[in-house]
Image (spheres, rainbow, N blue to C red):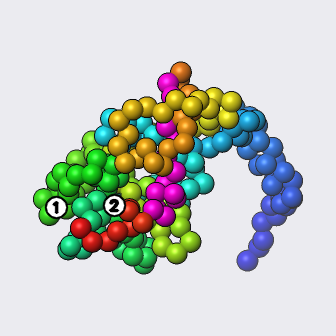
Amino acid sequence: MARTHRPRTDLHALIRDLDARCRARAAGLPDETKPQDSWAAVLFLVREQLFLTPLDQLAEVLELPRDITRVPGTSPWLIGVANHRGILLPISHLAAFIEGTQSSLGQQRLESVKDRRRDARARERVLVVRQEELPCGLIVSEVIGMRYIKRSDRVATVPEGLGAARGYVDASFLLDATPIPVIGLMRLMADPLFNTATA
């Protein structure tokens, strides 16, 4: 069988050319570098209240797990536990803790999780908070996204009506000229009140 002679391609030249083309295309992308004098935060809603929390306090943001197992006799804000990548993830409802209510957090709420998952407009998300021992999930009404917040935009004003969340808020930062409270989720997790297992 006769061999056909093809011109040999220099692999290094090919890689250099590909790298140059990728860099040229990347030049048109938005700059994602962190602005000076700023910190990364996640902006989210609990009912109608906007909150910020430092990005480094969160491991990830999840959709509501398909299967959540209710734990009888626990605090009204503890929805149950879910298997997340082989780890048992306790899931609490942040609004219920803040409001001090059990509004629809019983079996009816658990049964409605599957219905809400089928609803494309469902916006509830689970914030997985970083912890050394066991991560914990917090259901919030909506996660709006990540924001870079200027440290110079800190204000002492804290909105009224934060309920139990007020104890975990030290300050607010201006976002579009509106003071948004910063909630310390790791501090909340360390609070014995939040960690009380029984109702």
Crowdedness near tag 1: few (<14), some (14–19) or many (≥20) residues, C-alpha within 10 Å? some
Q: Which residue is mark 1?
A: 106
**Which quarter of the rendering shows the C terminus?**
bottom left
| Residue at point 42%, 36% (across, down) | 50
In the depicted view, which residue is nearer to us: 6 or 104?
104
| Residue at point 47%, 68% (across, down) | 135
| Residue at point 55%, 38% (across, down) | 171
Disc 2, SS: strand
| Residue 102 sits in quarter | bottom left
| Residue extent of the magenta highlight | 178-191
Q: In the shown orientation, is residue 168 left or right of residue 96?
A: right
Residue 12 magenta-drawn?
no
Q: Which residue is mark 2?
A: 92
- Residue 157, image x, y percentages: 52, 29
In the depicted view, which residue is nearer to us: 78 or 165?
165
Can you tell which mark lies on residue 114?
none
Query: Looking at the image, is 168 positioned above or below residue 85?
Result: above
Disc 1, SS: loop
| Residue 37 sits in quarter | top right
- Residue 85, image x, y percentages: 43, 73
Three-letter amino acid code at disc 2? Ser
Q: In the shown orientation, is residue 171 left or right of residue 7?
A: left
Q: Is residue 89 visible?
A: yes
